[in-house]
Image: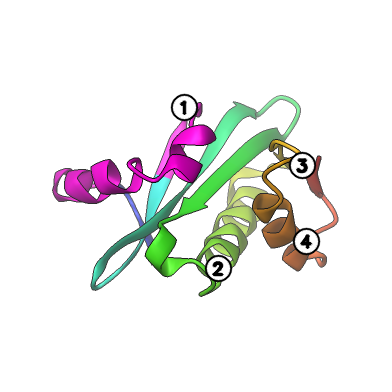
Amino acid sequence: MLRPWRPADAPAVVAAYRDPEIRRWRQESGCGWAAASDNGVLGQISLRTINLDEGAAEISYWVVPEARGRRIAEQALRAVTAWSFDVLGLHRIEVNHSAQNTAPCLVANQRRETPALGCW
């Protein structure tokens, strides 16, 4: 389930940013959603540097340590890219990440049926 952030999510976000791997890659701004279950926040996904004239955006996502390996990022990526292409009208979404942080690209490669999703 993707939903807007809520004030009650603040403790989960603070706890997530205690993880050094999440803090290491945090520099985004833009529209974002909490990836959540009935048990709380599992991660986040954000569209960054949206350029509607060119139909392009960057995307970022992270998953809290205890939820990793459960395909949370892949499911969130599927939902946000489908919405971005079908509703928002984007043509390209880029996953820009450090070469030392390979997890985002591994997740993006699960979206092979969406050739407009680039990873570098």
Depicted 28 relative to depicted 93: above or below:
above
Q: Decide: marks 1, 4 in contact (CB < 8 A)?
A: no
User: What label sits on residue 75 in the rendered view?
Assistant: 2
Instruction: Tell me the quarter of the picture where residue 25 sits.
Output: top right
Q: Residue furthest left?
A: 8
Q: Residue 32's spot in the image, x, y percent?
A: 43, 42
Q: Name the residue under label 1.
A: 29
Mark 1 or mark 4, earlier in chain: 1
Mark 4 and mark 3: Cα distance apart in space: 15 Å
Give the amino acid at mark 4: Asn
Kindly check if marks 3 and 1 are in contact, taking CB atoms under 8 A apart as contact. Answer: no
For marks 4 and 3 on the same chain, the one whose residue lies earlier in the sequence: 3
Distance of mark 2 from mark 4, alpha carbons? 13 Å
Give the mark toward the camera: 2 or 4.
4
From the top left corner, tell me how far across and down residue 65 is, in percent. Answer: 42, 60
Query: Considering the numbered disc 3 on the image, is that residue within a helix, a strand or a loop?
Result: strand
Image: 20 above or below 43: above
Q: Upstream in the sequence, badge 2 or badge 4?
A: 2
Q: Which of 84 and 38 is in front in this view?
A: 38
- How many angstroms separate mark 2 from mark 1 (CA)? 21 Å
Q: In this view, does 76 lie to the left or right of 108?
A: left
Q: Which residue is drawn at 35% across and 41% down?
A: 17
The quadrant in which the N terminus is found is: bottom left
Where 32 sits versus 39, above or below?
above
The question of residue 8 being in magenta is answered with yes
Residue segment shown in magenta: 6-32
Task: Residue under label 4, please give it.
Answer: 109
For disc 3, the marked residue is 92
Mark 2 is on which residue type?
Gln
